[in-house]
Image: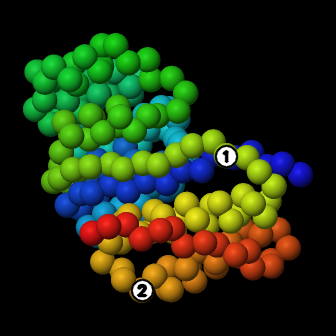
Amino acid sequence: MIYRYFLATGVMTLEKITPVIEALFGGFNLKPEPPDATLTPAFPTWSQVLEALRTLAGSLSIDLPEGAFDNMRSILLLLATHFGCLDDPAIVHLIETHRFERDADLDTLFVIANRFDDGHGLHVIKFNAGPYQGDLAHSATHLANEMLDLLTDVLPSVTDRKALAQIGRRLATILADNGEVIDAELPPEKPH
């Protein structure tokens, strides 16, 4: 049987997770692991982000005129005023031109987060994703290898490559349909 799926994971580097980060990126199954936070592919919709921003605006005690919660543009205008960035060309352009339909995209969320900085200090988002298909055993091995590669990128200080290989094998075991261990190869060492 052939399985098709979308393999994705990401890391964001920031000072701390704040209400703005929770509102914008919480739908990506944000997992704090200081000094970074990991994102997994939940891909929230813009309507889910709108709900989170409504909650954020309420927690900031922003005086909300009637209809302010109706759409993304209205709530973004209120928050831009609150954060003092209503004259920022990037946020103005985004509010005026973005369609805010379907799934939220990281590029737009990154722009919003950088304008609505409540002390989070977001620096970078690294995201790796792509479609994949294959039989279950091959898919599990591929996913384990992708995760190992990510671990070696994200955790360059980890020198025990055997420990990383064990993590990869454990991931393959979890993903295998019949519970058998699938051999996961360790990616080649990256030059320092």
Q: Position of residue 148 (x, y in %)?
A: 51, 68
| Image-based side of 156 in relation to 61, left or right | right
Q: Which is more toward the observer, 143 or 61?
A: 143
Residue at x-position 47% and y-position 49%:
128
Residue at x-position 80% and y-position 77%:
179
Rendered image: mark on residue 132: 1
Q: Position of residue 40 (x, y in %)?
A: 51, 55
SS at circle 2: loop
Q: Position of residue 38 (x, y in %)?
A: 41, 60
Residue at x-position 30% and y-position 77%:
157
Vertical position of residue 108 compared to residue 11: above or below: above
SS at circle 1: strand
* Residue contact between numbered discs 1 and 2, judged by CB atoms under 8 Å: no
Residue at x-position 51% and y-position 23%:
101
Q: Which comes sooner in the sequence, label 1 or label 2?
A: 1
Q: Is residue 177 visible?
A: yes
Q: Residue flagged by tag 2: what amino acid is it?
A: Asp
Q: Which residue is mark 2?
A: 160
Q: Position of residue 47 (x, y in %)?
A: 50, 32
* Residue 56 image-quadrant placement: top left
Q: Residue flagged by tag 1: what amino acid is it?
A: Tyr
Q: Quadrant of the C terminus?
A: bottom left
Vertical position of residue 97 compared to residue 136: above or below: above
